[in-house]
Image: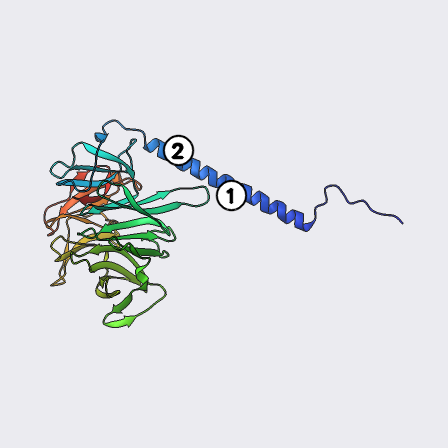
Amino acid sequence: MTTTATPRNHMTPLRRRLLVLLTAVLLLAGVGTGLVLHAADRADQANKPRSGGPAVSTGKLTLDQKNRLTFVNAAAGPHRTAVASVPSADPKGGRTASELKCARFYAAAGTGICLQSNPGVLKQSNRALLLDADLRTRHTYALAGTPSRARVSPSGRFVAWTVFVSGESYSSAFFSTRTSVLDTRTMKLTPSLEDFSILLDGRSYRASDVNFWGVTFASDDDTFYATLNTANKTYLVRGSLSDRKVTTLVENVECPSLSPDGTRVAFKKRVLSRTALWHEYVLDLRTRKETALAERHSVDDQATWLDNETVAYALPADGKVGTSDLWSVPADGTGKPRLLIPGASSPAPL
């Protein structure tokens, strides 16, 4: 009987599929490693000080200091992304930087929240740090996505954060957010506001596309305001933590921020003009009157009230995405914007 020898280069379908799979894995690993190295190189370049930049020095920073303005330092140099502070009366003066680095930060009444995002080869690592007045970590929470917004209630009892679950941006038609609220007294975590009941235009409402973002707290440790997004519309909602429900108030409101006296909300309104995607407004909660602020650039930020007359917000520095300066503007629609702190984001007055 004559037999035919199998050619040495013959490969079975199973072996061929395994080789293709192995090749794909190696290619993906190489791409992932390359992206991480590229990001690391960019970060290394950003961490190098630049001439003419602000004076930044390492020092003691606590959240119970008075008349200080804390923020995330965005200036190039070794203290980039560090939580820093300046005197409220001299915001362009020398900065005191801590060792803590955050993507988003906020603080009130000696309680801080730091959202961190660390890139990895296969997966980005995101977490929230609950901080005491000395910036020491009390608890750490894994985040389901990329950090977006963070707030602390005036008393320091409640903390909220919002993440992009898919990593998309607000300007995209396809994104998902998740907003969590933590009671720092009981350490009870509400993983998602989507579990709260909704009254939309006076009627009970449920939908699979509901998203919340941009929480801001009232001083009663129960009432909060936030953005509700559903059916391609955004709403300002007023919520109750104890009742676990929200009620819609006004349409086309994003990233609300409640004034210290609790009477007004600063927010960004989608306008879709030639020069701006969002415009900053202030809403009187009693009369529902909206006042356009003097800032003409598109503000993609949750504004912060420095006092009852002034709001602050971040804008891309020199129009470049990935960098930011802090600006301020009168809350009554008068005046004009002024540069508050160059190379900064996430302001929180102490």
Residue 62 is situated, as x and y percent measured from the top left of the image, at 20, 39
Count up the numbered dots: 2
Residue 104 is situated, as x and y percent measured from the top left of the image, at 28, 45
**Which residue is at the front of the view, 89 or 99?**
99
Farthest residue to the top: give it.
51
Whether residue 232 is visible, yes or no, is no
Whether residue 56 is visible, yes or no, is yes
Q: Residue at x 10, y 50 (%)?
A: 308
Q: Secondary structure at mark 2?
A: helix
Position of residue 29 in the picture relative to residue 257 (left or right) = right
**Which residue is at the front of the view, 37 or 104?**
104
Farthest residue to the front: give it.
186
Mark 1 closeness class: few <14, some 14–19, many ≥20 residues within 10 Å: some
Marks 2,1: beta carbons within 8 A? no
- Which colouring convention does the figure follow? rainbow
Q: Could you give the CA–CA distance between mark 2 and mark 1, rounded to whole angstroms?
A: 20 Å
Position of residue 340 in the picture relative to residue 160 (left or right) = left
First reached walking from the N terminus: tag 2 or tag 1: 1
Q: Which amino acid, by three-letter code, is at mark 1?
A: Leu
| Residue 63: quadrant of the picture | top left
Residue 177 is situated, as x and y percent measured from the top left of the image, at 33, 56
Q: Secondary structure at mark 1?
A: helix
* Residue holding disc 1: 28
* Residue holding disc 2: 41
The quadrant the C terminus occupies is top left
Farthest residue to the right: give it.
1
Q: Which amino acid, by three-letter code, is at mark 2?
A: Asp
